[in-house]
Each structure stands twice: as structure tokens, then as C-alpha cells.
Image (cartoon, rainbow, N blue to C red):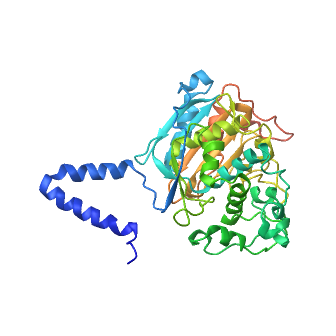
Amino acid sequence: MAPLPRQFFVPIAALLLLALAGVFGPRLWQHYLAALARRSAPLYAPRERLAGGNEPLAPRVPPQLEQLEPQGLEAAARYAAEHGSRALIVARHDHIVFERYWQATDFDTLADAQGFTPLLAVLATGVAIQHRRIGWPDEPLGLLLPEWAADPRGAITVRNLVQQASGLAAAPGLNEAHDLSTAALGSALGAPPGTQRFVQPVDAQLLALVLERVTRQRYADYLSAALWRRLGAADAWLWLDHAGGMAHADCCMFARQGDWIRVGQMLARDGSYRGEQVIRPGWVGFMRIPAKSDPDFGSLVRLALHPLPGSGAEGYASADTFVVEGRGGNRLWIVPSLQLAILATGDARGRDAQWDDARIPNLIMRSARDYLPPAARPGADLSTVVPGH
């Protein structure tokens, strides 16, 4: 007889606790509810642990010590709160300078990373190139995946995957597949590689498969050794297609929401975190090269080259800003020139129609005492640069 699914036991456990609460009083039930409130429990199973370093953060300091005016940070927090944020964390020069939390969360709250998850595959690819496990960004997959050695899909390059421009058509049901590797390798080519940016799960999944093949390690083990542990982040969990199977690389990683600021701090310092070069210098710069398939994006990051789409939305206040955009409202803004990393997490409903993606980072950038606004162009409205003019 096949074992009952794990989800079957959840309501049974709840009923048992209700019965025990009747015997031992309400305190037991209160403890159970409190535990649920503290625990953003992953709903995806089975899972695999992504081992972290579980190290403390760099020191938290008042924003004034990092030349940031508190008024701008408070204004950013108000905007975040008005638009469904769970957390806003600001770091500068490896220091946490501002934190604000909502919806009964804190730094340690476990949350679905959603669209942040594939960022780890892109970063780990940089480490694999550094270690010469992958030859170069334009290496064709036909040299890395024997299944595609004589297949037209073998012309897809590593660069195409990290830029979400493989040309592969959407694979319906990929996230529900019992064998992710087979499903990803079975994806059909829908357009010439490198010509169209198309957000879909298969590109990140193929990156994870390539990393497993070239490193001869499980994806979680390589991510841990190459990135997560070295950043000192706490243990996290990846969703597997089946017990002992392949990890989902596109979504559904559960980690402490605050640990993503560590990733942002590393990106702001070109791959260095607290004095250690986690990824070779230049890989973050490579990620910021505009893609031919969509010059508004590099490798999984939005670039501040053009004004953001949308009526009334302003552009970013610093031209070197780049953004990791996660489904559900997660955002990680990086401003290397100001050594700023800004994390905002959102709920599963995402952002509302009035959300201006540049509003929070611009308020924070302009609160920096050493911020220099872009030079006014001929015919520009000086009131946007010098108040009162």
C-alpha cells in the first residue's frame, strides 16, 4: 500500500491538537498558533537543505554614520508600507543602516524567494567559469550536455541562458514535472537563440543542470559551497521534483527574507563580501552588459539605461542602478556608485498598479549626503534638480 501524502497528516495533527487542548487547556493550542505565526512554512515538498554559514550580519549602524539622512529612509519606508511590503532593509558600505518590517515578519522570517531564486544560478555560473568548470560565457550547450551535442539546441550558449534568451518555447507544466531534467531537455526551440528575451523556468533549470554536470555535485551542494555558505546566510531549502531528484532553480526557494541583503551587498562590491572575493571581479559587470535580446536587461537584472515603462514613473536617480525583480513584489536594488543595497520584499499578491519601481531607491539615493544629481540637460526643468527653481 502506498504511503499517504505528507499533506494528509496536517489536518489530522490539527484535530489532535484541538483534542489535547481540551484536556490540557488553551495554552497548548496557543503555542501551536504562535509557532505557525513565526514559521513561514514551505508548502513545496520534498525539499533539500541549502546549507548556509549561519553567521551574524555585519554591524548595524545609524544611517547618519553612513551619510544617509533619516528623513529619506522614513519616506521610503512609508511608501513600502503603503504598497504591501513585508520588509525594507538598506545596507551601505557593508553596514545595515535601516530596517523596517510589516505583516508580523522580521529579518529571520522564512519566505518564498520567488523570482530571486534564479539569481543564484546566474551567480553560481560565474563561480563555475572562475573555476574553469565552464569555459567561457559563449560556450555552446552542445559541449556541456551530451544530449544536445548534435542537436540544433546545442547552439544555445551559457550567455543565452543567463540572459533569459535561449529561444526555447515555454514548457507547459515544467514546475509540476516529476523529472525536471528530462522535461527541460525536451523543451522545443521556438526562436533563434539570443534574439528574444522570454522569462520562463527552463533557462534557469538548464543552468542548474549544466552546473550539476560540470561540477559533478548536486545543485544544492554547489550553491552552498560556491555562494550561500560563504555569504554567511542561514540554511535555506530548495524544492525538489521528487525525493532525491532535481532542485527547482527558477522558483520556490525558502530562505530568511533578510539574507538577500547579503547578496545585494556582494553585488554592490563586484562579487566581494566582507573582504572575501566570493565571485571573481568582473562577473557582476558582465551581468550588467545590455542583452541584444532586450537592452533594458542584462543577465537577470534590469538596467537603469532608460526610463521605466508606465505612466508617471520616473527613471532611477543614478545611472548605474540595477535591479533584481522577483515575482510577488520582491526587489533588490543595487547602486554601486553609492555602495547601496536596498531590499524590499512583498507579499504573494505583488505590487499594485500605482507602484513606481524607482520611488524607494530614489528616495534613499537622494538622502545620501554625497549623492550628486545627474547634470541638467539643455532645456531640463531645474525644479527637479534644485528645489525652488
Vertical arrangement, residue 159 with respect to residue 101, above or below: below
* In the foreground, 91 or 114: 114
Expressed as whole percent of the image width and height from the top left, the position of residue 29 reads: 23, 53
Q: Which quadrant is the C terminus positioned in?
A: top right
Q: Which quadrant is the N terminus positioned in?
A: bottom left
Vertical arrangement, residue 320 with respect to residue 143, above or below: above
| Residue that appears at 80% across and 65% down | 196
Toward the left, the furthest residue is 23
- Position of 73 with respect to 181 (left or right) is left
| Residue that appears at 67% across and 37% down | 266
Toward the bottom, the furthest residue is 1
Expressed as whole percent of the image width and height from the top left, the position of residue 248 reads: 60, 61
| Residue that appears at 74% across and 47% down | 128
* In the foreground, 281 or 309: 281
| Residue that appears at 36% across and 50% down | 37
Expressed as whole percent of the image width and height from the top left, the position of residue 363 reads: 62, 38
